[in-house]
Image (tube, grey):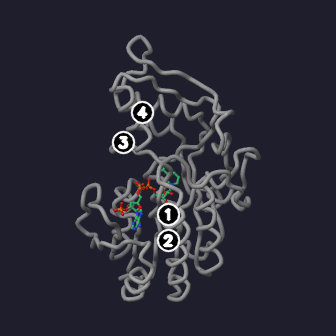
């Protein structure tokens, strides 16, 4: 049977991705912390991806047919950690994937864009304006340069309906503490339902292995960050009524390093028959 190595196995995306990958392959999940709910079929392996020698020897020994590289230091980490994980560790992984001729799927982000030239094509060149975007863009470049069988997927805010996403959890905490919550109404994104994203990643990892380059995998509905937050808070039964809460809408125009409009085309995903429903249709179906 096919062997798949998934990095970021303790992360938010992985809690839905791993069970789906386990339907295609023997799965080894790499992380440092305990995962969100153990998936029985997955063998978890502790590994610090910034340890280059350990990463090389572990992946060489496992010799996976497929690597899904979902580990990342997301915004909130310091710049040197973001660089070490998103760029340098990605460079190690891509180098070995190239050497072993493994299929590599790298999970990237819409934040590689500056937010001034939307809508972005699948192959739009990265032009990041913050440290996270820069580190992920460097990761993308090294993946495409080092591994012939790699595809870079650019995704957006990931949410699920069973396990609260990090952003919404943070907003809920702010409100529950009785603090004012400021939401940006001019930051545009295409939040992506975790299950649709996981299915798309698996299609690219196991079936459409001839697909290379970059592909946008975002939900097909553009929402402001504020609208998305309010929809998610209501889904998680948090009151968004300002008679009991203090929610303020604001512009992000004056905030340096925050891309405003990361709207993306979905031409390539549509051509592959990938379904990426928007937030309203996911909530309505639920
Ligand atoms: N969540 C979003 O809304 C969003 C939006 C756009 C793109 N993405 C991309 O989607 C992917 C998955 O995101 P996520 O939300 O699932 O991330 P997450 O919940 O923050 O999880 C990050 C994962 O990376 C692992 N990791 C970080 N540093 C590591 C290291 N030095 N060695 C080994 N593992 C390390 C963490 O494992 P340990 O902590 O156990 O080490 C964890 O499993 C990432 O590539 C991210 O950039 C996410």
Query: Where residue 161 sits in the image (x, y, percent)?
Result: 37, 41
Q: Nearer the viewer, mark 4 or mark 3?
A: 4
Between the C-alphas of marks 2 and 1, the distance is: 6 Å
Left-right relation of 158 to 138: left
Residue farthest right in this picture:
117
Query: Where residue 77 sits in the image (x, y, percent)?
Result: 47, 53
Q: Which residue position is annotated with label 2?
A: 205
> Mark 4 packing: few (<14 Cα in 10 Å), some, or many (20+)?
many
**Camera-side residue: 90 or 205?**
90
Left-right relation of 165 to 129: left
- Secondary structure, mark 3, is loop
Kindly check if marks 1 and 3 are in contact, taking CB atoms under 8 A apart as contact: no
Q: Which of marks 4 and 2 is in front?
A: 4
Task: Tell me what residue is drawn at x 47 percent, y 30 percent.
Answer: 231
Q: Nearer the viewer, mark 1 or mark 3?
A: 3
- Secondary structure, mark 1, is helix
Q: In the image, is the residue at mark 2 within 8 Å of ligand 1 by its beta carbon? A: no
Task: Tell me what residue is drawn at x 67 percent, y 49 percent.
Answer: 264
Upstream in the sequence, badge 1 or badge 3? 3
Between the C-alphas of marks 4 and 1, the distance is: 28 Å
Between the C-alphas of marks 4 and 3, the distance is: 11 Å
Task: Tell me what residue is drawn at x 67 percent, y 51 percent.
Answer: 129
Residue 201: mark in rendering: 1
Left-right relation of 202 to 263: left
Image quadrant in which the N terminus is located: bottom left
- In this view, 236 is above or below 2: above
Between the C-alphas of marks 3 and 2, the distance is: 26 Å
Q: Which residue position is annotated with label 4?
A: 171
> Mark 3 packing: few (<14 Cα in 10 Å), some, or many (20+)?
some
- Secondary structure, mark 2, is helix
Q: Nearer the viewer, mark 4 or mark 1?
A: 4
Upstream in the sequence, badge 4 or badge 1? 4
């Amino acid at each position: 049977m096919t062997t798949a190595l998934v990095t970021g196995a303790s992360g938010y995306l992985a809690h839905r991705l791993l069970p789906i990958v386990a339907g295609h392959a023997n799965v080894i999940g790499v992380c440092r912390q305990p995962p969100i709910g153990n998936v029985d079929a997955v063998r978890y392996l502790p590994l610090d991806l910034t340890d280059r020698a350990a990463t090389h020897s572990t992946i060489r020994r496992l010799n996976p047919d497929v690597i899904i590289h979902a580990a990342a230091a997301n915004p909130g980490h310091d710049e040197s950690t973001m660089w070490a994980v998103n760029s340098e560790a990605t460079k190690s992984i891509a180098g070995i994937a190239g050497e072993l001729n493994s299929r590599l799927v790298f999970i990237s982000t819409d934040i590689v864009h500056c937010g001034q030239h939307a809508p972005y094509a699948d192959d739009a060149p990265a032009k990041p304006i913050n440290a996270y975007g820069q580190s992920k863009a460097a990761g993308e470049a090294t993946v495409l340069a080092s591994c012939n069988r790699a595809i870079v997927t650019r995704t957006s805010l990931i949410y699920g309906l069973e396990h609260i996403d990090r952003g919404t959890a943070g907003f809920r905490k702010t409100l529950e503490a009785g603090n004012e919550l400021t939401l940006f109404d001019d930051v545009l994104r295409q939040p992506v339902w975790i299950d649709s994203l996981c299915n798309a990643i698996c299609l690219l990892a196991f079936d459409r292995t001839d697909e290379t380059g970059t592909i946008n995998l975002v939900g097909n509905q553009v929402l402001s960050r504020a609208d998305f937050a309010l929809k998610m808070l209501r889904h998680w039964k948090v009151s968004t009524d300002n008679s009991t809460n203090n929610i303020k809408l604001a512009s992000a125009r004056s905030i340096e390093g925050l891309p405003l409009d990361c709207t993306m085309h979905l031409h390539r995903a549509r051509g592959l028959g990938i379904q990426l429903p928007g937030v309203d249709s996911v909530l309505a179906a639920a």
